[in-house]
Amino acid sequence: MTSSATPNQARALADRISGDAFFSLWLTQRQADPYNPVCAAATRRLYASIWKLWLGHLHRRGLDWTEATALDVAQFLKQLKARRAKASDGSIRVVSEVSQKRYWQLLHWLYCYGKEQNWCATLPSADLHESDRPHKLNDDPTVLDPALWRALPSAFPQTAHSDCYGIRDLVILQLLYEHGLTSEEVRGMRMDDLIRSDGLCSDRSQPAVSGAHIRGSRSCQERVISFSPALRESTRDWLDFRQSQKKYAQREWVFLSDRANQISIRILFHLVSRTIAAAALLADLPLPLRCGPQVIRNTVIREKLDQDWPIEKIMAFAGLKNRESVWRHAKWKPGQGFA
């Protein structure tokens, strides 16, 4: 069934399924989800315990799971804030904000599924007043929190205050942030891959760089990217310095170390991780669990999905071979927003 049910219709349908049976059906389809399956036994037990608490909360109010309202969800979450949990060391602690977010998220997943199946008529988890919602926490380590993502450019090197390698690092970070390139695509970029515009810059002897050919081991990775004005300017600054160094003259790679070697994975990872850490500090945000170049690529792809880019356009943009690759990188599936 694809049409929306009225409250009476949903109630009549749900009379045939208990809360426990509904949870079992939802869990079965989540275990079979090809993009984000619930596989770990501990996770299944956790979800079952949260749902049992929720059903108990409703039962004390004489309500079926299909009759829940936003007020019931708000009261449930308020009780969680006052609840004390026993830790493994025997100490008593409050239920954390992260746990509250996960309780709410599970209810939202279940009620979205129930509404899709026409077993309930409303989404009580979605109708909460903003003050009743748990703080929006990013508990997916494969992408950056939206607030941290927005703050990231503030931690990029500033041209006016950077040495030559700071300018190189700025170009690399802009490429990652704007185009979601892989580490190997950045490291493997050659001088011959750069696309130069026809005209000369007014104050420079070399043509400006307008983009680059991206090459890889798979045919889907072959693509052309266009540089933003800011990226063109920083690239020009780096190439001017690079040209002035005799040790770089015969080297084919765009990005080189101070010893004229191709930039290493270690240097690249260190650059990205320290930049993310600096952005988190500047924005007073927690440091994410993962801080390497891959988390930037994943977040770029996730953003494109949330901006409703067509899947085929994202595949071409990121050099990915199919839809599943797009979803897997961003831990995303149709209908899911930026958590």
Image (cartoon, grey):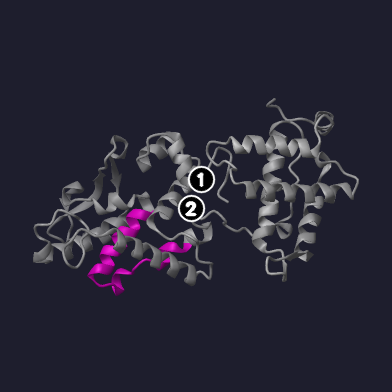
Q: Amino acid at mark 2?
A: Thr
Q: Give the residue displayed 48% in from the left and 48% down from the top.
A: 303
Give the residue pinned by disc 2: 142
Q: Position of residue 235 (x, y in %)?
A: 24, 58
Compared with 316, 170 (above or below) is: below
Mark closer to the chain start, 1 or 2: 2
Q: Give the residue displayed 83% in from the left and 33% down from the top.
A: 11
* Closer-to-camera residue (337/277): 277
Horizontally, residue 121 falls left or right of residue 193, namely right
Horizontally, residue 168 falls left or right of residue 61, namely left
Residue 226 shown in magenta: no
Compared with 163, 190 (above or below) is: above
* Closer-to-camera residue (263/236): 263
* Closer-to-camera residue (232/44): 44
**Residue, far bottom:** 161
Horizontally, residue 173 falls left or right of residue 111, namely left
Q: Give the residue displayed 60% in from the left and 43% down from the top.
A: 38
Give the residue pinned by disc 1: 331
- Does dot 2 land on a helix, a strand or a loop? loop
- Does dot 1 land on a helix, a strand or a loop? loop
Q: Amino acid at mark 1?
A: Lys
Would you say residue 267 is visible in this rendering? yes
Magenta range: 151-177
Residue 167 shown in magenta: yes
Tag 1–tag 2 contact (CB < 8 Å): yes
Q: Position of residue 59 (x, y in %)?
A: 87, 47
Instruction: Give neighbour class at mark 1: few <14, some 14-19, many 20+ (Cα, 10 Å).
Output: many
Instruction: Give neighbour class at mark 2: few <14, some 14-19, many 20+ (Cα, 10 Å).
Output: many
Q: Give the residue displayed 23% in from the left and 51% down from the top.
A: 189
